[in-house]
Image: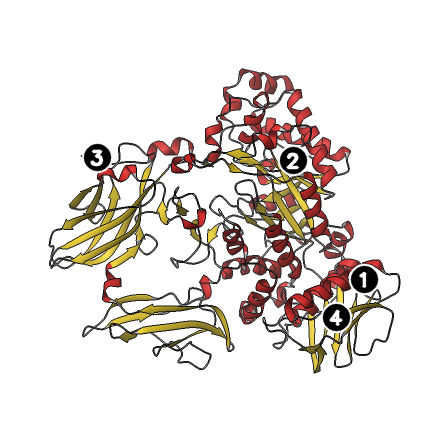
C-alpha cells in the first residue's frame, strides 16, 4: 500500500471527519465515517455517463472499473467520457480529500466522487457501486441521494490466504481480491511457503517448485498422483498488477527459520537435520529448521531478491513463527554458532537469524514483518510485528516502539468453524462466528494514545489445512472478512452489529456478483427434531446467528417474507414437509431448508450432531478417499480423543446399532503430546467399536470391525445393545493397536429392538 495511505489513516486526516451513524436506507459496507441521507434518488441506467477530466489516466481507470462492475451487477455498462456535462452524470474529480479518503455526493441531478488520490476515487466508486447493487436484480436502479464523507480508521486492512497447504486457482484469488476491494480491504497477505509446499517459482532454484511444490498425502491418498502446484513469476506479477489496480498491496510471506521442511526437501544442505519428504502431507508444528551457514543466507538472499523483483510491497513477511528449537539444540554446529556469536540461547539465535534476513530486505528499501515470535530474543528497530498469539505481541511491540498489525488467534483465524450446524465446511472445531469477528476491537485499551500510533491495522487469516477446495476457502473467508473490513475502516463510535446485520442481504448479493462463494449456513434455519407427545415430533428451526427471522411453510410452498414466523418448536405429525428460510427486513438470507418429519430420522446422528467426549483439538476433517476432495466424507472429531456421546438414548427394549465408520491417517505433528493419546487394546485383529454407558461406565457392546480396515473409504458395522432401564448416554469409541490410522465415526443409527 502507498505510504501516503498509512500517513493519512494514522494522521490528522482521519480525525478531521465528523462521525455519524449510517443512515438506515443506505447499505454501504464498511459503514462510512459520515453519511447524511438527502431527498430523492439518482436513476442509474444505460444512458448514464461517467465523466472524468481530460487526460486524467488514473481517474479514467477507476471510471472503467466502476462501469465494468455496474455491467456485472445491473447488466448495462455506462459510457466513460473525458469532459462533458455533469448533469445526469457520475463525475470523478480530484477536488477532494487526500489518501484513501473521499467524498460522495448523490442527488437526483447527478453524482460526484471527489478525492485527491486514485485510492480515494476508487473507494468512492466502490461505495457508489454498493449503493447501486442492493440485490442481484438487473436493469436500472434508483440510488438513494446522500452526502458521504469517508476515510479509514486503520491503514492496514488485511486478509491472508494460505496457498502453501492447498493451491488456489488464479481466478479464485482474483475473485477474493475483488471482494476485498469492494469492501475496502487493502492488504492481501499471500502465504506462499510452508512445510507442505513451496508455491512460488524461483528461477535460481528450480527444485523449489519441481520438488518442494509437490507432495504425497498419507493414508489412502498416497495411491493418488502427487498433490501440489505453484505459481510462475508471470502469474504472480499478474496477480500483483490485478490487486494494485484495486488499491490492494500483496505482501508475500517466505517462512524462516521454521516451517521449512519443503525447501529442505528440495535442498537438504539448507537444513539442520535430514528431511523426511513423506511428512510433507502432515499438519501441525514441524521440527525442521534452516541451518545458520553462510550458504543458507546466500540462498535466502537470492530467493528474497527474486521475491522483491515480483512484489513491490514495502513489507516482506518472513514468518518466524513456531520454530521448534529441538534440532538447533541437538546440533553441535548450531551450538558452536551460538557460542561464537556470544548469544544466550536458541531464541537469541533466531533473533539474530531474523535480523540478518532483515538486512537483506533493508538494502532494497523494504521493511521486515513477521509473526510475534520474532520479539523473542530481541528485534531490529524497523521490524514490524504481526501479533497472532492473542494481542499480547501487539501490545509488547507497540510499547517497545515497533509498528504492529493485530491478527489474533482464535478470533481472526478463519479456519475455525462459523456455527455448530452440521452443514459447516471443514475446518477447526471451535466456533468463531461472524458476530465474534465483528466484536473484535483492533485498538487495545492497554495502550496509550501514543502507543496506539504503532498499530498499523488488523488482519484476518485463512489457513487452508482443511480447506481442500477453492469453494471451501471462500466459504471460510466470507462473509467474516467483511465484518473485519468494517472494524478496520469504520470509526469505533459508529460500529453497530444490528446495523451490520441489516445490511447482510445486500452484502451477500454483492459477493455473488463478484463470483465469491460465501458461507450461508449460519443464517439458515438449523432443523433439529425431537420426540414429542402423542406420537408427534417437535421441530426446532433456530438459525445459529439469530439474524433476522425464520419463516416457514407446511404446505409445500416456498417460504416468503409473508409466511408464518417461527416462534418456537413446532409439534408436527409424521410425514409433514417443512420448508424454512431466514429473512431480514423482508429479504431472504441464506438457502431454503426442507425437512420431512420422519420418526426414523430421530434414530440417526452424524458425528457433527453427536457430542464430543472432549475438545482438546477438535477438527471438521475429510476422509482420505476417494480421490476427489468434494466427494469425501466429513468427520467431526477430537484428534486427541476420537470419542463421541449420544445423549438420552432409550434402551428400555434394547436396540440395534449401525455405525458408518472411516479410517484416516494420524498425520499430525504434535510432538510429545502424541504419547499421551490413549488407546484401548483390540480383542480382534481388526479392532472394535466400543459402546459404553457413559465414557467411564459399563461396556454394553464391542462390535468387531472385521475387514473394514481393507476399505479406504467408508464401512458399516452393526451390533446389538442390551436393554437398560430409562434413557442412557451412549459413549462410542474404538479399540486399536496403533494410532495411525485411527478410526472415526461418520454417522450412527440406533433402532429399538423389535
Cα–Cα gap, marks 2 and 1: 34 Å
What residue is disc 2 on?
Answer: 201
Foreground label between 2 and 3 = 2
The C terminus is located in which quarter?
A: bottom left
Cα–Cα gap, marks 3 and 1: 72 Å
Q: Is residue 237 left or right of residue 746?
A: right
Q: Is residue 25 visible?
A: yes
Residue 563 location in percent, x, y? 42, 80
Q: What number is the disc on residue 714?
A: none
What residue is disc 4 on?
Answer: 78
Q: Mark 4 or mark 3: which comes first in sequence?
A: 4
- Where 168 falls versus 65 (above or below)? above
Cα–Cα gap, marks 4 and 2: 40 Å
Q: Mark 4 or mark 2: which comes first in sequence?
A: 4
- The secondary structure type at the circle numbered 2 is loop
What residue is disc 1 on?
Answer: 60
| Contact check, label 3 and label 1, Cβ < 8 Å | no
Foreground label between 3 and 1 = 1
Q: Mark 3 or mark 1: which comes first in sequence?
A: 1
Amino acid at each position: 500500500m502507498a505510504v501516503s495511505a498509512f500517513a493519512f489513516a494514522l494522521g490528522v486526516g482521519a480525525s478531521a471527519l465528523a462521525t455519524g451513524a449510517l443512515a438506515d436506507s443506505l447499505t454501504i459496507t464498511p459503514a462510512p465515517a459520515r453519511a447524511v441521507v438527502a431527498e430523492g434518488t439518482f436513476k442509474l441506467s444505460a444512458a448514464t455517463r461517467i465523466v472524468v477530466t481530460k487526460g486524467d489516466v488514473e481517474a479514467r481507470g477507476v471510471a472503467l472499473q466502476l462501469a465494468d462492475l455496474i455491467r456485472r451487477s445491473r447488466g448495462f455498462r455506462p459510457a466513460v467520457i473525458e469532459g462533458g456535462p455533469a448533469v445526469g452524470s457520475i463525475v470523478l474529480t480530484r477536488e477532494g480529500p487526500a489518501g484513501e479518503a473521499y467524498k460522495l455526493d448523490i442527488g437526483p441531478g447527478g453524482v460526484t466522487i471527489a478525492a485527491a488520490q486514485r485510492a480515494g476515487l476508487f473507494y468512492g466508486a466502490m461505495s457508489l457501486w454498493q449503493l447501486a447493487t442492493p440485490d442481484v436484480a438487473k436493469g436500472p436502479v434508483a440510488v438513494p441521494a446522500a452526502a458521504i464523507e469517508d476515510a479509514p480508521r486503520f491503514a492496514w486492512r488485511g486478509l491472508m490466504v494460505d496457498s502453501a497447504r492447498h493451491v488456489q486457482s488464479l481466478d479464485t484469488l482474483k475473485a477474493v481480491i475483488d471482494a476485498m476491494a469492494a469492501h475496502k480491504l487493502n492488504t492481501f497477505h499471500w502465504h506462499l511457503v510452508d512445510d507442505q509446499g513451496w508455491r512460488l517459482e524461483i528461477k535460481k532454484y528450480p527444485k523449489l517448485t519441481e520438488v518442494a511444490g509437490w507432495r504425497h498425502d498419507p493414508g489412502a491418498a498416497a495411491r493418488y498422483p502427487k498433490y501440489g502446484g505453484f505459481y510462475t513469476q508471470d502469474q504472480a506479477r499478474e496477480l500483483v498488477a490485478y490487486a494494485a489496480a484495486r488499491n490492494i498491496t500483496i505482501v508475500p510471506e517466505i517462512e524462516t527459520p521454521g516451517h521449512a521442511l519443503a525447501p529442505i526437501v528440495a535442498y537438504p544442505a539448507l537444513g539442520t537435520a535430514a528431511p523426511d519428504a513423506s511428512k510433507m502431507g502432515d499438519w501441525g508444528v514441524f521440527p525442521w529448521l534452516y541451518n545458520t551457514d553462510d550458504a543458507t543466507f546466500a540462498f535466502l538472499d537470492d530467493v528474497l531478491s527474486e521475491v522483491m523483483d515480483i512484489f513491490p510491497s514495502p513489507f516482506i513477511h518472513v514468518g518466524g513463527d513456531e520454530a521448534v528449537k529441538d534440532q538447533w539444540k541437538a546440533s553441535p554446529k548450531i551450538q558452536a554458532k551460538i557460542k561464537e556469536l556470544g548469544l544466550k540461547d536458541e531464541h537469541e539465535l533466531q533473533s539474530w537469524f531474523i535480523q540478518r534476513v532483515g538486512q537483506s530486505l533493508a538494502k532494497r528499501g523494504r521493511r521486515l514483518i513477521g509473526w510475534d515470535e520474532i520479539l523473542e530474543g530481541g528485534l531490529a528497530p524497523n521490524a514490524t510485528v504481526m501479533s497472532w498469539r492473542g494481542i499480547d505481541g501487539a501490545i509488547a511491540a507497540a510499547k517497545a516502539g515497533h509498528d504492529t498489525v493485530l491478527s489474533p488467534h482464535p478470533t481472526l483465524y478463519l479456519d475455525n468453524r462459523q456455527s455448530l450446524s452440521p452443514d459447516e465446511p471443514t475446518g477447526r472445531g471451535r466456533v468463531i462466528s461472524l458476530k465474534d469477528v465483528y466484536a473484535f476491537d483492533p485498538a487495545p485499551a492497554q495502550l496509550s494514545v501514543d502507543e496506539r500510533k504503532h498499530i498499523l491495522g488488523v488482519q484476518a487469516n485463512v489457513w487452508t489445512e482443511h480447506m481442500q477446495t477453492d469453494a471451501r476457502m471462500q466459504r471460510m473467508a466470507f462473509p467474516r472478512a467483511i465484518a473485519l473490513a468494517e472494524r478496520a475502516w469504520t470509526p469505533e463510535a459508529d460500529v453497530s452489529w444490528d446495523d451490520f446485520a441489516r445490511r447482510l442481504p445486500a452484502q451477500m448479493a454483492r459477493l455473488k456478483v463478484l463470483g465469491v462463494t460465501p458461507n450461508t449456513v449460519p443464517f439458515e434455519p438449523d432443523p433439529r427434531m425431537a420426540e414429542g407427545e402423542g406420537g408427534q415430533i417437535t421441530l426446532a428451526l433456530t438459525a445459529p446467528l439469530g439474524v433476522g427471522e425464520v419463516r416457514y411453510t407446511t404446505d409445500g410452498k416456498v417460504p416468503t417474507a409473508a409466511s408464518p414466523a417461527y416462534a418456537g418448536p413446532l409439534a408436527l405429525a409424521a410425514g409433514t414437509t417443512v420448508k424454512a428460510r431466514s429473512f431480514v427486513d423482508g429479504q431472504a438470507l441464506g438457502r431454503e431448508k426442507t425437512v420431512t418429519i420422519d420418526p426414523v430420522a430421530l434414530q440417526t446422528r452424524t458425528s457433527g450432531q453427536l457430542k464430543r467426549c472432549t475438545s482438546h483439538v477438535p477438527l471438521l476433517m475429510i476422509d482420505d478417499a476417494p480421490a476427489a476432495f468434494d466427494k469425501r466424507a466429513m468427520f467431526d472429531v477430537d484428534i486427541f480423543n476420537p470419542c463421541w456421546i449420544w445423549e438420552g438414548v432409550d434402551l428400555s427394549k434394547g436396540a440395534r446399532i449401525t455405525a458408518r465408520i472411516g479410517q484416516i491417517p494420524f498425520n499430525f505433528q504434535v510432538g510429545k503430546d502424541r504419547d499421551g493419546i490413549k488407546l484401548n487394546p483390540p480383542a480382534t485383529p481388526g479392532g472394535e467399536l466400543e459402546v459404553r454407558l457413559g465414557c467411564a461406565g459399563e461396556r454394553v457392546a464391542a462390535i468387531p470391525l472385521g475387514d473394514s480396515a481393507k476399505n479406504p473409504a467408508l464401512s458399516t458395522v452393526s451390533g446389538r445393545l442390551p436393554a437398560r432401564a430409562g434413557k442412557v448416554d451412549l459413549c462410542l469409541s474404538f479399540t486399536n493397536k496403533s494410532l495411525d490410522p485411527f478410526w472415526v465415526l461418520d454417522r450412527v443409527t440406533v433402532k429399538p429392538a423389535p
